[in-house]
Structures are given as C-alpha cells and as structure tokens.
Image (spheres, rainbow, N blue to C red):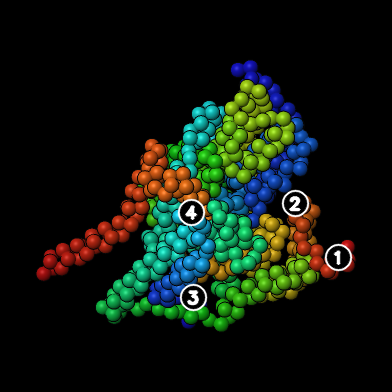
Amino acid sequence: MDIFLQAVELVSTPEVAIVILISSCYGLFVGSLPGLTATMSIALLVPITFFLDPVPAISAIAATTATAIFAGDIPGALLRIPGTPASAAYTEDAFALTRKGKPEIALGASLISSVVGGVLGVLLLLIFAPSLARFATRFSSVEYFWLAVLGLTCATAVSGDNIIRGAISLLIGLLLSTVGIDIATGYARFTFGSIYLLDGVSFIPAMIGIFAISQILRAAKDGVCAISEPTREITRLSGEMWRLLRRYWKNILRSGIIGNVLGALPGAGADIAAWVTYGISKVFSENPKQYGKGSEEGIVDAGAANNAAIAGAWTPALVFGIPGDSVTAIAVGVMMMKGITPGPRVFFTNGPEVYAIFLGFLAANLLLLPMGFMAIKASRHILAIPQNVLMPIILMFSIVGAFAVDNSMFAVGIIAVLGVVAFMMEENSIPFAPTILGIVLGDVMEKNFLITMIKTQGSAAGFFERPMAAILGTLSILVWSWIILRPALRWYRGKTQAVEQIHNEG
Amino acid sequence: MDGTMKVSEFSLACIILLLGSGIVLRVNTFPVVGGMAYGPAFFPRLVGIGFIVCSVLLFGSAWLKRRAVVENASERTTLVAGANLPSVFRFLSILVALGLYIAGGPVLGFLATTTLVTGAMFAMFRVKLRLLLILSPCLSVSLYLLFEQLLRVPLPRGLLERLIF
C-alpha cells in the first residue's frame, strides 16, 4: 500500500500531467496521419525523453501509444486509410459505415471501445502482470508456430464467402513475407538484387499501397470520387457511444481481455490482437455476413482489443525485460537509460516508479475520452474538403509517409506496385485482409516452424508434444477442417434440397 | 465497356497458375544447405504450390460457372470486361505521377517535385486553376514543415534546393 501511495505521489505532479496532455495531443496528431505509426511516433519522441524524469518519460511513451492507436481509426473511418496498422482489421467496416452516412457510429464505436479496452488493459496489467508474463514466457517456438497458424486461420475466416479468393489473398501476403534474407541460411530470396529488399517488404509502405493508393486509383478510374458524400457534421456522437457501450459491453470486455493476453505474448502486439479478436467476433456474431460491410461489432471488438493489447505488451517488458512489441522495446531502452532495469525484481527495486507508470497509463486512457471526442469533432473538416482536392493531398501524404519509413524512394515504388496489385485484387473480389495478415504472420510462422523442426530433428510429432502446443495445434486443425468442409457441406445440402424439390414437384 | 478492370475467372486462374509455377521454378534455383532438410526454398515452395492448387480450384469454379451460364441462357457473365479510355488514362496518370516523384525527387528536391506533381494531380482531378496555383505550393510547404522541421524526416533536397539553401 505504501508503494502505491508513493506511486500516486509521483504521478500527481504538474510535470507528469502536462507531459501526458502534450503526449496525448502528439499521439492523436501523428496517429491520424496515414503512414506514421505509433512506433514511429515513439521513436521520434525518444530524444525528448532524455530531458524528462523517469515517470514522465515513460508516461509520455504510454500516452502517445494509447492515443496514436485510437487516432489511427479516424483516417481509417473517413478516408479508408488506417493511420496505424492496428486499425487495419476494421477499416473496411468503419469506412463502409461512413459511406452509408454514419461516421458517428464508426468513430463512436472506435472511441468508446478504445477507452474501455485501454482502461481494462491497464487494470489487468496492474492485477495480473506477473502471472500473465510467467504464462507467456512458457511459450516456445512450437506454440508461436501454432499461434501464427491460428492467426492465419482468422485471416481466412474474415475473408468472406469465397474461400479460394481468400486463400489467394493470404498466399500473396505470405509470398511478400518471404522476401528478404532467409533467417536460417542468410540467403536473399526474391530481392532481385535490390539492397532495399534484403530486410523484406516494409510493412508501412505495403499498408499505404494496399489501402491508400488503391483507393486513389479507384477514384482516378471512376472519374468521380469513389467516396460517397457522407454526413457533413458528425453529430450524436456521445449518444451513439453510450448506445454502443450498452449494447456491446460484453464484446468489449471479452475482446479487451483477449487483446490484453495476446499483447502480453512477445511478438504479437496490437495489430495481431485486432485481427484475432475481429475473427473471433465474426465467429460469435449473430450477423457474420455484415463483417467487412459496416459491422459495429467488428469495430467494437477489434478496437477494444488493440488498445488493451498496448497495456498487455508492457507485462513481459516490465516483469521479464522481454518487450511484447516494438513500442515496449523502445520503452525498455528508455527505462534502462533512466536507471530502471526491467526484470522480475523491478517491483521490489523500483516499485513506486513502476506503479506510477501504470497510473500514468491509466490517466492517458481516461484522457482519451475527451480528447478523442474533440479529435473526432475536428475531423469532420476532412469531410468538408471536396474529394477532387482531397485525393491529391492523400497521394502526397502517402508518398511522404512511405518515404519517411526508411528515407528512400524505393518505398514510394513499393506503394505504387502494391497499390496496383491491391486495386486489381479489389476489382476481382479478392479481399485485402488476408494479405495483410499474411505479411505480418508469415515471418513468425516460418521462423518458428524452422526452429521447431531443428529442435525436434524433423519430427512432426514435436508439434504436439507440449500440452499447450497440442491444444493450439488441434484447435487449428479443427478450424481449418471446418473452413474447408463448410463449402462442401453447403454444396451437398444445396444439391440434396434441389433433388428433394424435383421429387416433390414430380 | 463499363470501365471495370475485371478479368474472367478463367483468366484469373491462368494468372495464379503462372505465378505459382514461376515461384516453384524460381525456388528450385535456391541453394540446398548441407545438413538442413528445410532450406530457404521450403516455405516459398509451399506458397507456390498453394497458388497452383488455388488456380486448379479456380479452373473448376470457372468451368462450373460456364456450364451454369450455358444451362441458363438468360444469365450472362462477362468473361473479360475491358476498361474505357479516359479511365485508363486517369489510372495511368497516378502511376506516372508516382514514377515522376521517384525519378524527380532526388534531382529537383522535395519542394519542387511535390509542387509539380500535386499541381498535375489537381489538374487531372479538375480542380480550378486559381485553387490549384494556391494549393500546390501551400501543400508542399506544409508537408515540408511538418515532416522535415517538426518530425525530423530528412526529405530529398535535390540539386535545386541545394543551390538555393
């Protein structure tokens, strides 16, 4: 209790309050710019943290991440360009709602789920941090392999009715993930002699190409803007938020918890948490056909999960010094620079500071409600811009956003190529979502597969020897069997019904 | 000619088959590392085989659809729909703009290239000339201030800007 009171004292200073406020504004701003990720915003923040005390420095990182992840939903909903990769899972739904003239539902769902998910995530972090981290560290390569397989299963599950087209999309993503140096042998695959491809296809330019450039190409092809005229003013936002909270509170709680647990797994992070919960949400939904076409549930579930995952990622980072994602990797570096060494003893050696960071995180998530509200209200000005003016502006933001990733024009080439590929995919009813998940999880799956095969000396039984691996593996096989057999069963049922109809008519 | 850029199921199957076959042929040239059963070719080969399987399934689907069209003469499917010329021109102009940016950026620098490319894009999207002349340089300068000055992203300077600054 003494430690907690000391933590309250540490966090209740004007310096911490001002830092959290400014960091939240910064996070909202950077997150809403297409192409600039939460990670990039944190990386840009690091030099400033040199001049701050440990608690405000880490609180700044926590506040920026929480607000940036939410802010990524704003351009996703209004322009179909997710500001951060974590918003990609439900961009189609949010944008579909905007096209139907309901941007307040898309953004309201995103804000309320982000706030509740974020607060829930921090509370879970406070309560369960040590035990959750211990559980996550028990995972070895084989569990991570099956987790990646389950993630890809989600990609296929969210791909719609046409499994073949969903599989093609997934394979495109997996193919892109194989570009670059092979981790086991160091052989450069599909790089065509380019040094820029040795590290693989950069995720951010890939995202910009797939979402933004394909949208601009569509607008150019159609001659008129592809985006229909939405509501000029975002009204009834608070009303919609409370309606959504009352209706989907169970979804928010479920996805918040799952997102938090997934965030605690090293290498998972907010974007994977969003994809997985989106898939789970679709499976449990009474209206799965609405997913991808403006599903409130999809936005609420994935929106709660990605914000809850941010807090989850701090669990292994603090307790074992293993960062859950790239943001916490930077945070661990800053903490060590400030004399706080993450590890099992951090709660004893720097207890007040650690709990003060948790409280700062909680304050940032609560502050997200009024600040996000204001950000959404201000965002309606984006809608007031004529579409023929907006498209070249988005093109320029996309180009500069891609260039900013590694300061090379090669990234601009990537957005052009993948923009065309995504445009052609959309024209031919091939969904984007599995491609994106394939890019994210392909590398994780291949790496853990190879490590497991080396460890088990090529024995496939090794994939089921550990209890958790056996559970995840069996689950993956069952879900895949269901996905493959479902169309066959549907076809068989249709044929049986047709035969019965002919008999009845006869 | 409705302006779509769709290809028929059969053509899509052919493209996917070519892609899958290309990947499998390419990965066959990858080196085999001694003592390792799963080299750099293993995972891409699986992806290539996956594409081939999908193409076979698409061929089957295309065949079934074709049969359904023949059986039901009232239904018509466009197997290959072309695109109209203005659509193609606008579509290609975006790609040309990106190409010009890649080629022009390092030579002309960020400010000049962005102003020119944005101006051309505004013109293509039929923005009024007065607005175009105001917006193009304003957008370039705003992006420059935001990314270069505030976010410290080193944007390409080019020969022109190096001479000026």
CA distance separating discs 1 and 4: 52 Å
The disc numbered 2 marks a residue on which chain?
A: B
Q: Which residue is mark 4?
A: B36
Answer yes or no: are tags 2 and 3 on the same subunit. Answer: yes
Answer yes or no: are tags 3 and 4 on the same subunit. Answer: yes
Residue at 60% across, 68% down:
A192
Q: Residue furthest front?
A: B34
The answer to which of marks 3 and 1 sits earlier in the sequence is 3
Q: Residue A422 placed where, x, y %? A: 53, 66
The answer to which of marks 2 and 1 sits earlier in the sequence is 2
Instruction: Report if the CB atoms under discs 3 and 4 are less than 8 Å apart.
Output: no
Instruction: Report if the CB atoms under discs 2 and 3 are less than 8 Å apart.
Output: no
Viewer-side label of 3, 4: 4
Q: Which residue is mark 1?
A: B162
CA distance separating discs 2 and 1: 21 Å
Q: Which residue is mark 3?
A: B4
Q: Secondary structure at mark 1?
A: helix
The disc numbered 4 marks a residue on which chain?
A: B
CA distance separating discs 3 and 4: 48 Å
CA distance separating discs 2 and 3: 40 Å
Q: Which residue is mark 2?
A: B151
Residue type marked 4: Met
Residue type marked 1: Arg
The disc numbered 1 marks a residue on which chain?
A: B
Q: Secondary structure at mark 4?
A: loop
* Viewer-side residue, A433 vs B71: A433
Using the image, determine if residue A44 lies above or below residue B109.
above
Image quadrant occupied by the C terminus of chain A: bottom left
CA distance separating discs 3 and 1: 45 Å
Residue type marked 3: Thr
